[in-house]
Amino acid sequence: MPVVELAGVTKAYESKVAVRDLSLSIEAGQMFGLLGPNGAGKTSSIRMMMGMTMPDSGTVKLFEKPFERSNLDRVGYLPEERGLYKKMKVLEQLVFFGQLHGLSAGDAERKATAWAKRLDIDEALPKKTEELSKGMQQKIQFIGSLLHDPGLIVMDEPFSGLDPVNAKLLEQTLLELKDEGRAIVFSTHRMDQVEKLCDSICLINKGQAVLSGRVREIKSRYERNHVIVEFDGSADFLASSEIAEAQNYSGHAEIKLKPHGDAQKLLREASEKAKIYRFEMVEPSLEEIFIQTVGESVDA
Amino acid sequence: MRNVLLVAKREYLEQVRGRAFKMTTFGVPLIFAAILGIAFMSSRGLGSGKHLAVASNDALLAAEIKGQLVGNKDTKTKVDVVSPATPGDRDTLVDEVKTKKIEGFLWVETLQGKPAKATYTSQSSGDFITGARMREAVNHALLDARLQSGGLQHQAAEDLVKGIPVETFQVKKDGAVVKSNATASFWKGYVMAILLSMTTMVYGMNVARSVIQEKTSRIFEVMLSIAKPADMLAGKLIGVGAVGLTQIGIWLVAGAIILGTPFAATILSGDYAVHVSALETVLFPVYFLLGYLLYSSRFAGLAATCETEQELQMYMPLAAVPVWLSFSLIMVVMNDSNSAWAVGGSLFPPTAPIIMFLRMASQVPPAWQFAVSIGLLVLSIVSVLWVSAKLYRVGILMYGKRATLPELMRWLRYS
């Protein structure tokens, strides 16, 4: 059952069209990545899902019903612009958010404390928000969006500003939430995370969806003409006539072959010049697909 | 409604726990008590306890002046009489002032056929209180002396020059004639109007500041995913208004305690004998709430269109316009509380709270005027709130650039 459904949604601000004829559908238990360069229309799309702005045309459905504010009680939202009440104590603030979502003060406090322990930030609960680092504030805000056990979690750039340890913790938590059957939508620029976490993506550029579908299916559309080589010795083989592009990172080379380029010939050339530890044909990364697709849509 | 109350509670607790609230809530009554205390202490010794000299060629006049100066209740002032005085005595007295043996001397010359001439020489040029006492004593003594020289007995002359106080009475609506005090009424109206304008402005601006702080801290986007903009605005207005009422309540209790002390009773007597009626006690919070809601709803919408607190500050002079307008009418209203200006000002919503209180100080206006005044205020609040809510709804999500007038008009259409 689709938890979120956007059908032919368009939103314009004065003369600028922020989102044009966007359609997407997100199922329960699915992690969905909303990708796109800066100003592509990701935040505008998310704001329409959250009912903060209304589409000029098209429909937004949450939990299979046309948008209603009452449905937001089943949605957890982490906006791109982080904001908390700076003078409030963290626990008080979380209880306040929980109560606004319909929880009793006692339930909100119990859940806030449990989540804070789970995310290893319980020592921050008695402190004022202004005493916390940005990363800690982000974790608190993340907890605030989950207190009411939402069926849909919408996050705008959830990993920005997090150190690797906390980013890993967030990734792990999102995977657990997905396993519990919740639908998760997030926007990001971090392709490695999308590749690891998302089941489906929608790539938006200039307000339009230029690529969408399941990650596996999208990647399989692209030719397996990328090679990773780990080697010791001369890198002269990277000048081979079989190669279209190559990046050499001190013994680790990422290579894109020319159309119909011969990988076996390249392997022979490489082994003549250097000692080869790894030679692997791989699919293009999502990052490469992203750059290629956005580049094509710009050219078009 | 639950969310409105939750937002109001959060707003209330945050402001009440703040340092500014504690300082003003407890500081204002303390300052008020301190002012009364200082006034009480200083009034007891004002212009008295000095060592002065009166010198004149007319010994009788000098004695009369001394009598005036040390008479009444002032037993602390010591007055030396030098009479008949010579130019040499004047030099001696100047020396005594210089060596601080005396604080000043009054030199009075009366020459046949010419007006009397009096000078007061002292260490301090700014001692206007003693100067005034001197003037009063000299004039009184001279008039007394002239009347006596015209054949009147001392007591008859005294009775003649004694001032006659004019008591004022007011005819109430029920026909009862009651004693009144115009000066006390003026001060009461003035103080209540200042309190009303101050609290209305302060709490109205608090709402605006709270809006802009939430906008700059980007909390709005989180809040909008949980609560409706109208609930957020209503909660904010109720929460901050409740803070204002709490503060006024504490001030009223503290004021009653302070006014109950003996030293306050001494100071606030005669022309300063303030009596606050039951009607005024009831209407003060009513007009505070209405004035506050009109003011704060206007500024909540305006704050949502601003980017920074500094930008909001630029609108402050606009905020004070109704207050300036109200106070510019103060003399007109106090002179005739039923004049067209006074009635118009008390019905015109932006000035109604202040002008109505100024009018009430001298005469209670007819009931229908209260009804119209409150009705118009409520209508204005509803209209302003309607526009502000629209600006608020769009403005809180607009970052990055200052909104122009055409953009504001578009915002009104969007929402």
Image (cartoon, rainbow, N blue to C red):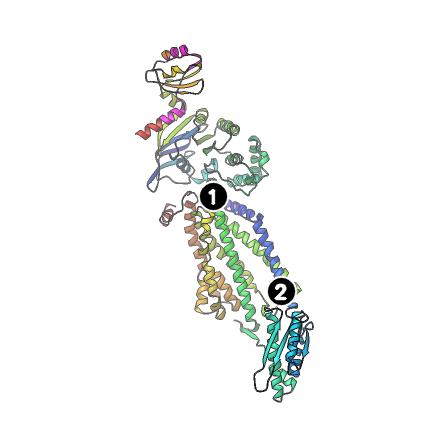
Q: Please tell me whether mark 1 sits on a helix, a strand or a loop.
A: helix
- Number of other residues with Cα within 10 Å of mark 1, as a class: few under 14, some 14 to 19, many 20 or more: some
Q: Please tell me whether mark 2 sits on a helix, a strand or a loop.
A: helix
Pick the residue in front: B112 or B216.
B112
Q: Report the Cα–Cα distance between label 2 and label 1.
A: 46 Å
Q: Quadrant of residue A186?
A: top left
Residue under the point 56% across and 35% down:
A111
Q: Amino acid at mark 2?
A: Ala
Q: Quadrant of residue B38?
A: bottom right
Which residue is identified by label 2? Answer: B39
Q: Is residue B30 above or below residue B159?
A: above
Residue B216 circle label: 1
Report the quarter where the N terminus of chain A lies.
top left
Please count the marks in the image: 2
Q: Position of residue B168 (x, y in %)?
A: 56, 74
Chain ID of residue with mark 2 = B
Tag 1 or tag 2, which sits nearer the N-term?
2
Q: What's the magenta region?
A: A266-292
